Image (cartoon, helix red, strand yellow):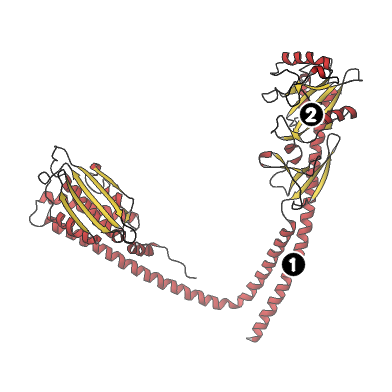
C-alpha cells in the first residue's frame, strides 16, 4: 500500500512539472504570435487608409486640372466636371467651387447665384452673417457652386470662407503652395454635423498667372481614416493636430473627440499617413490584452495537464467509485418505490372521497320517493358539477381551482344571469368540491318559478376577504333579486343539508339564509386557512415534483 502511494505521488509530480513547462512555453508563443498578428493587421489597415487618401487627393488634382474657367463668376462651374468627379466613386459629402473674387465682382456673383436658383444668393460671411461689400479691399473666397445639390447644401453658396478660422488658413496655404491642402478636422455642413476634413485644390485662370479659385471636397473622418470592423484586432484613433485630443469613432459612425490623460489607455502602435500636404497620425489600441490572453491560454494548458494527471491518478480509485455508484442507484430505486406507494395511497384516498360524495349525492337525491324525472335532472346536474371540478383540479395538477372558474357555464346552470365579483383567489381541492356543489344547488333553485315581476331572478354572487393574515376570513354572499318566499320553490332536503351543514362544516365556517323584501340571500363565512389550505397544496406539489437525482 505504501509502494502504491509512492508511485501515485511520483506520477503526480512528473505531471505537474510537465504541465508547468508546457504552460510557460505556450505563454511566450502566444505573446509573440499576438504581437506579429497585431502589427501585420495594423500595417494592412494603415496601407488601406493611405490608398484611400491618395485616391481622394488624386480626385482633387484631376478636378482642378480639368477645370476650365472662362469666367469665374459662374454658379454652375461644377457641371462640366460632374461625370469626372463621380467616376472615382469616392464618398465625399459635398464638392464645392470657391471663386476668388474682387469686391467689385460681388454684385455680379449675387446675380449669378440668384439666376442659378440658389435660395439665398446674398453675399454673406462664413457664419451666414451679413457682409459689408463696401468695406472690403481684398479679394474674397466665395462659394459659388456645390455638388450634390440638395436641401442641405443649396443654402451654402453665397458664403465667403476667407475669414473662416479653419478653411481660411487652408485656402491661403493651398494658394501659396499651389497644391491640394487638407484642413484641420471640423464639423461639415452645420455646427452639429459630422466631423470631417476639407481638401482644397487651387485652380488657375486660363492665363496661368492668376488664381481663379478652389475646387473643394469634404469627407467624413469615419469612413476616410477610422473605418474598422468589429472583428478587427484593434481600434483606431486619429491624433487631432490642433490639440492633445484624439478623434475616435463612436456609435453609428460618428466621430467624437477624446481627451488624453494619465489614465488613458496606452496605444499599441502608431502609423503616419499623408493627405493634403500634411501628415496625420493614426494611433492603434489593441482590443484584447495580449498579456491576459497569453496568461489565460497558459492557464488552460496547465489545467489540461493537471486534469490529465488527475485522471491517471484517479484510475486507481475506479473500483471504489463503481461501488459507490451502485449503492446510490439502489437508494434512488428505493426512494422511487416509496414515493410511488405514497402517490398510489393518495390517489386511493381521493378516489374514495369522490365516490363517497357521489354516493351521498345519489342517496339523498333519490330518497323519500322523489319524482323520478326531477330527481334524474338534479342527479345529472350534481354529478356534472362534481365532474367539472375534478376536471379543473386535474388541469391544475390538484393545486387548487380559481374561484371564478366554478361559475363557468359548463359548471352551473344559468351562469349567464349571474353577476360574479370578488378577488382573484385559488381555493383548495377540498374547498373547490364543496363550493362547486353549493353553487350548483343555489343556481339550480334560482330558476324554479318566476320572480315577482314575471321574469327570471337577477343573481349576484360576491365574495371578499376580511381581516389580517393569518386571521383573514372568507365572506361569500349569494343574492337572488326580484324573488320571495312565495315565488321561490323551497330547497330540497339534500339542498338544505348542503347549504346549512355540509358546506360550512367542510370549510370550518358558518352559513345563514334568509329572505329580504326583494331578494333571497345565502351567506357563508369561513377562515381563509381552510379555504386555501396550503398544507394540502404543499402535499400535492411534493407528489407532482420531479424526482431529484441521487448523487
Residue extending farthest left: 369
The residue under the point 83% across, 36% down is: 275
Kindly identify which numbered label has been placed on residue 164. Answer: 2
- Counting from the top left corner in percent of width and height, residue 133 is at 80, 18
Q: Relative to 420, is 134 on the left or the right?
A: right
Residue 274 seen in the figure = yes
- Counting from the top left corner in percent of width and height, residue 289 is at 73, 56
Foreground residue among 268 and 353: 268
- Counting from the top left corner in percent of width and height, residue 365 is at 14, 55
Residue extending farthest bottom: 2
SS for callout 2:
loop
The residue under the point 85% across, 30% down is: 180
Residue 71 seen in the figure = no
Foreground residue among 357 and 277: 277
How crowded is the residue under tag 1: few (<14 C-alpha within 10 Å), some, or many (20+)?
Answer: some
- Counting from the top left corner in percent of width and height, residue 325 is at 50, 74
Vertical placement of residue 303 versus 107, above or below? below
How crowded is the residue under tag 2: few (<14 C-alpha within 10 Å), some, or many (20+)?
Answer: some
The residue under the point 15% across, 46% down is: 516
SS for callout 1:
helix
| Pointer 2 or 1: first along the chain | 1
* Number of the front mark, 2 or 1: 2
Q: Cα distance, mark 2 to mark 1?
A: 64 Å
Q: Quadrant of residue 129?
A: top right
Number of marks: 2
Q: What residue sits right under mark 1 in the picture?
A: 22
Vertical placement of residue 468 versus 142, above or below? below
Kindly identify which numbered label has been placed on residue 437. Answer: none
Which quarter of the rendering shows the N terminus? bottom right
Marks 2 & 1, CB-CB < 8 Å contact? no
Amino acid at each position: 500500500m505504501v509502494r502504491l502511494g509512492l508511485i501515485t505521488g511520483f506520477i503526480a509530480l512528473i505531471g505537474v512539472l510537465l504541465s508547468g513547462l508546457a504552460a510557460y512555453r505556450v505563454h511566450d508563443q502566444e505573446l509573440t504570435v499576438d504581437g506579429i498578428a497585431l502589427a501585420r493587421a495594423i500595417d494592412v489597415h494603415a496601407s488601406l487608409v493611405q490608398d484611400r487618401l491618395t485616391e481622394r487627393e488624386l480626385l482633387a488634382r484631376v478636378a482642378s486640372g480639368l477645370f476650365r474657367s472662362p469666367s469665374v463668376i459662374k454658379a454652375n462651374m461644377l457641371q462640366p466636371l460632374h461625370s469626372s468627379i463621380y467616376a472615382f466613386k469616392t464618398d465625399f459629402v459635398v464638392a464645392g467651387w470657391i471663386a476668388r473674387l474682387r469686391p467689385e465682382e460681388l454684385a455680379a456673383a449675387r446675380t449669378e447665384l440668384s439666376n442659378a436658383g440658389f435660395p439665398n444668393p446674398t453675399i454673406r460671411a462664413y457664419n451666414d452673417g451679413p457682409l459689408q461689400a463696401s468695406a472690403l479691399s481684398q479679394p474674397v473666397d466665395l462659394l459659388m457652386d456645390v455638388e450634390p445639390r440638395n436641401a442641405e447644401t443649396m443654402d451654402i453658396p453665397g458664403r465667403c470662407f476667407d475669414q473662416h478660422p479653419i478653411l481660411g488658413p487652408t485656402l491661403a496655404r493651398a494658394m501659396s503652395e499651389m497644391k491640394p491642402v487638407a484642413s484641420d478636422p471640423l464639423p461639415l455642413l452645420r455646427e452639429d454635423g459630422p466631423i470631417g476634413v476639407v481638401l482644397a485644390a487651387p485652380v488657375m485662370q486660363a492665363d496661368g498667372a492668376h488664381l481663379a479659385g478652389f475646387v473643394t471636397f469634404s469627407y467624413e473622418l469615419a469612413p476616410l481614416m477610422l473605418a474598422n470592423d468589429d472583428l478587427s484586432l484593434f481600434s483606431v484613433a486619429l491624433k487631432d493636430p490642433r490639440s492633445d485630443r484624439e478623434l475616435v469613432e463612436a456609435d453609428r459612425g460618428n466621430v467624437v473627440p477624446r481627451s488624453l490623460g494619465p489614465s488613458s489607455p496606452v496605444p499599441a502602435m502608431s502609423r503616419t499617413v499623408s493627405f493634403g500636404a500634411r501628415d496625420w497620425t493614426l494611433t492603434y489600441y489593441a482590443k484584447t490584452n495580449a498579456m491576459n490572453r497569453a496568461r489565460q491560454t497558459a492557464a488552460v494548458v496547465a489545467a489540461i495537464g493537471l486534469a490529465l494527471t488527475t485522471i491517471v491518478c484517479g484510475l486507481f480509485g475506479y473500483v471504489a467509485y463503481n461501488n459507490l455508484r451502485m449503492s446510490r442507484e439502489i437508494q434512488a430505486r428505493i426512494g422511487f418505490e416509496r414515493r410511488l406507494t405514497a402517490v398510489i395511497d393518495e390517489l386511493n384516498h381521493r378516489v374514495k372521497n369522490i365516490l363517497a360524495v357521489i354516493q351521498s349525492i345519489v342517496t339523498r337525491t333519490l330518497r323519500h320517493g322523489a319524482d323520478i324525472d326531477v330527481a334524474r335532472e338534479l342527479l345529472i346536474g350534481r354529478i356534472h358539477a362534481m365532474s367539472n371540478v375534478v376536471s379543473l383540479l386535474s388541469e391544475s395538477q390538484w393545486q387548487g381551482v380559481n374561484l371564478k372558474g366554478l361559475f363557468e357555464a359548463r359548471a352551473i346552470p344559468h351562469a349567464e344571469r349571474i353577476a360574479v365579483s370578488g378577488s382573484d383567489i385559488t381555493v383548495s381541492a377540498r374547498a373547490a368540491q364543496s363550493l362547486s356543489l353549493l353553487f350548483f344547488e343555489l343556481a339550480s333553485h334560482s330558476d324554479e318559478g318566476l320572480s315577482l315581476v314575471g321574469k327570471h331572478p337577477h343573481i349576484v354572487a360576491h365574495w371578499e376577504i376580511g381581516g389580517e393574515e393569518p386571521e383573514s376570513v372568507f365572506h361569500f354572499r349569494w343574492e337572488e333579486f326580484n324573488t320571495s318566499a312565495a315565488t321561490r320553490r323551497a330547497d330540497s332536503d339534500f339542498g338544505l343539508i348542503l347549504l346549512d351543514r355540509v358546506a360550512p362544516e367542510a370549510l370550518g365556517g358558518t352559513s345563514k339564509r334568509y329572505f329580504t323584501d326583494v331578494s333571497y340571500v345565502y351567506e357563508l363565512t369561513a377562515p381563509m386557512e381552510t379555504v386555501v389550505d396550503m398544507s394540502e397544496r404543499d402535499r400535492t406539489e411534493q407528489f407532482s415534483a420531479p424526482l431529484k437525482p441521487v448523487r
